[in-house]
Amino acid sequence: MTMDVSRRSLLALGAGLGASTLLGGSALARAPKLGTQTPYWHRFILGDAEVTVVSDGPLPLGPPKGTFVGVPDEEVKKMLTDNFLSPDNVVLEQNSPIVNTGDKLILFDTGMGTSKAFGPTTGRQQKSMAEAGIKPGDIDAVVLSHAHIDHIGGIVGADDKPLFPNAQYYITQSDFDFWTDEGKLGSPLKDFVVHARKNLLPVRDRLVFIKDNQEFLPGVTAMAAPGHTVGHTIFMVSSAGKSFCFMGDLTHHPVLLLEKPRMQFSYDSDPKQAAETRVRLLDTIAANKIPVMSYHFAWPGYGHIAKTSEGFHYYPSAMQMNL
């Protein structure tokens, strides 16, 4: 026997059957709502290394107009709605991998910290680390893709003291110099400069400046990706023949800046250079089928990038629950 379920009957079914009907009555729904969520961390294996992704919490940018530019506003909204995303509020994640090589514990980027410039949902990294059983004092290295507010904000706490007391910090000198420049305090970049100085200057004596193509930690190699900032860097992370690319801010959004990678992003220091860098490096990543770990994609940000006719497509990987 075959059953022909028309679109109309399917919609009627959805509208007509309440939860109590589906569950056989209200007697099954008397347990109190818990109002809690799962911890904000995820762990997986990379070769001989163990990787724990921790979240600093969602970062809402608000409406896309004026932030994602170079494409008509209505087209941007359609790109979002076609992917079942809100056209009125672009929400990014903040995913930081912590790589345990067996010899070193390496954290990539530190979130917004105490700043609430993008609302109350950020600043969660320390809590996420605690949930994952990782102590700040055990971090040996903090690798910074660049010195923007949402990547260096969690270096110091509310008391302005370093949260990772035993770590060395790795960043490009060009980004450090640009974003800690006292002369920019009177410019539109003031808030970013204040935040960078607050977080980077207390660890100035622990900073190590990195260069393009340098393997500055075992299994961690820098790749220059300028444009978003002058010294923006992405990283190849490798262990026992397995690897992923931590993309930092090479692309902020899995739809808008992938489907149309030459679209410009208003937070880029040099939007044109950033778009050229994005296309060049995504071409390489896609051609070599390199797994990616994205700071701003939907949690937990791990997947693959594939080339399309106009741009790229992101395929998120399923979370592996067995280590």
Image (cartoon, grey):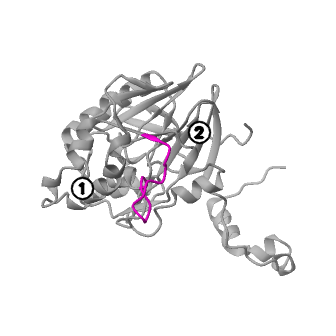
Select label 1 or label 2 by which is in front.
1
Foreground residue, 207 or 67?
A: 207
Q: Is residue 47 above or below residue 129?
A: above
Secondary structure beneath label 2: loop
Residue at horizontal 24 percent and vertical 55 percent from the top: 193
The answer to which quarter of the image holds residue 222 is top left
Residue at horizontal 72 percent and vertical 54 percent from the top: 4
Task: Determine crowd level at label 1: few under 14, some 14-19, many 20+ residues with C-alpha closer than 10 A.
Answer: many
Foreground residue, 274 or 63?
A: 274
Please provide percent x and percent y for residue 187: 13, 59
Disc number for residue 193:
1
Please provide percent x and percent y for residue 9: 68, 65
Task: Determine crowd level at label 2: few under 14, some 14-19, many 20+ residues with C-alpha closer than 10 A.
Answer: few
Q: Earlier in the sequence, mark 1 or mark 2?
A: 1
Q: Which residue is mark 2?
A: 317
Residue at horizontal 66 percent and vertical 64 percent from the top: 37
Q: Is residue 270 above or below residue 162?
A: above
Q: Quadrant of the C terminus?
A: top right
The range drawn in magenta is: 154-168
From this viewpoint, which residue is outermost toward the front? 205
Residue 13 vs residue 291: left or right? Answer: right
